[in-house]
Amino acid sequence: MQASFFQWLIGRSKRMVNSIAFYPALIAAVFVGLSILMISIDYSSFGTNIKSTWKMLRLRDASTARSIISAIAAGLISLTVFSFSMVMIVLNQAASQMSNRILDKLIGNRFQQVVLGFYIGTIVYSLFLLSTIRDIDAGIYVPSLSTYLLILLTVGDIFLFIYFLHYITQSVKYEIIISRIHTQTKKALQHTCRLDAIGEEAKSFQGQLLFTPVSGIFSGFNRDGLLSVLQEHKARLSLFHPLGKYLLEGIPFGELVTDSPQPEKNLAKAIFLHLFITKEESIDDNFVYGMRQLTEVALRALSPGINDPGTAINSLHSLADLLAFRLKHHPATTAYDEKGNLRLTTVEPTIEQLFDQVVLPIWDYGKKDRLLQQEMHAVLLQLQQVAPHPAICNILLAVEKQASFRMIQNA
């Protein structure tokens, strides 16, 4: 029960942080604090002294301040609605023409969240300020400092909106989205695959089987926490499945070996607290997921309804760069504790499995397209030069065979 709750908590926290409303809500809370601070300064002796000294910072009466704030609040509400509408249009277009998987790249984009947060924060600021103005206020007792700050914030929001229009029209371009997926996946690859040669072969253990407590996707694990638990109990754990695999509840997940003939009952629960089985995947935790997203973009581009081989070729180029890095760098499948004792072995997809998951689907779907056929052949030849591998040779043979068949047909 504790492990299930922890997995649920991890999933909920990730969804909350990646939500389109996370940063706007955070920034709005900051603006609430700013409004309270500015109103306190306005009505303090320090604020009234400033307004007494600098007459240009005064407002004549409460109605003037109320009119300015009301106009700004109404205008910013319209601006926010329009900006949200543009974001929704972009998301709808991306989902219909590319893939639902890439929506996270747009929803999780920090810049547009910050822009919307500034809009909402300024609206909240103006409403809080409006609620403090009294009809009996006049001269130095009108919150003019807060009002002038609101005017400056509004000018900043207008400039943000102008740049937001440019940014949102650029972000929906296929090249931009593919580039973002490629960049994020490359970072995950560099973090995971650090060995220049194939690492030590994972040793198989014979011990107690562990079973998945819930159904979901094996999305990652806390390496340091898991090693600490295994070291404390003098245990070794061998995982059966790679990251990104969907697991049903109750199937064998790994094998646990301890020095004691009867392992503690709570050890399995402690282990699963550091294993993440969620409903969603993340590129940061699993680079293969990023590669699959590029494959899905290519397949959608090759579909009859879209028929855009150029986008498929762009995805293929990004995949080729990622595969070239993976061919020359390898992930570690073993982990040791502080004393150098083997504690954990993991499973990583092989090169053959990677090509089968991310390259062959594109070839199966687009092998009759001449542009894709030529580009696939050129990319595979370069990959073979970078790091020769039997998996590349097998696909090259299929590509050359298809090209020869086309030439015979056209003869």
Image (cartoon, rainbow, N blue to C red):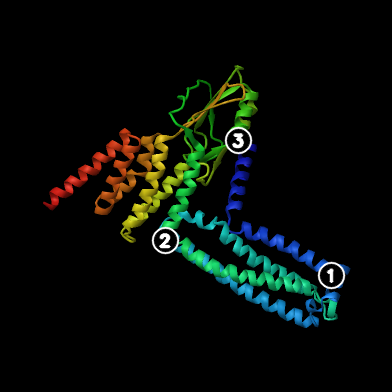
Using the rendered view, name the quadrant where residue 325 is placed. top left
Residue located beneath label 3 in the image: 274
Q: Is residue 268 left or right of residue 368?
A: right
Badge nearest the viewer, 2 or 1: 1
> Residue lying farthest left?
411
Residues at marks 3 and 1, CA–CA distance in whole angstroms = 53 Å
Determine whether the residue tagged by mark 2 lies in a helix, strand or loop: helix
* Residue pointed to by mark 1: 47
Return the residue nearer the eye: 114 or 102: 114
The picture places residue 183, in percent across and down from the top left corner, at 47, 48
Q: Quadrant of the N terminus?
A: top right
Q: Does the CB distance between marks 3 and 2 fall below 8 Å?
A: no
Kindly identify the amino acid type of the residue bearing the numbered disc 2.
Answer: Ser
Where in the figure is residue 249, as x and y percent of width and height? 52, 37
Circle 2 is placed at which residue position? 96
Amino acid type at image mark 1: Gly
Indicate whether 295 appears above or below 212: below
Q: Residue at x 88, y 69 (%)?
A: 45
47 on left or right of 175: right
Nearest the eye: 158 or 77: 158
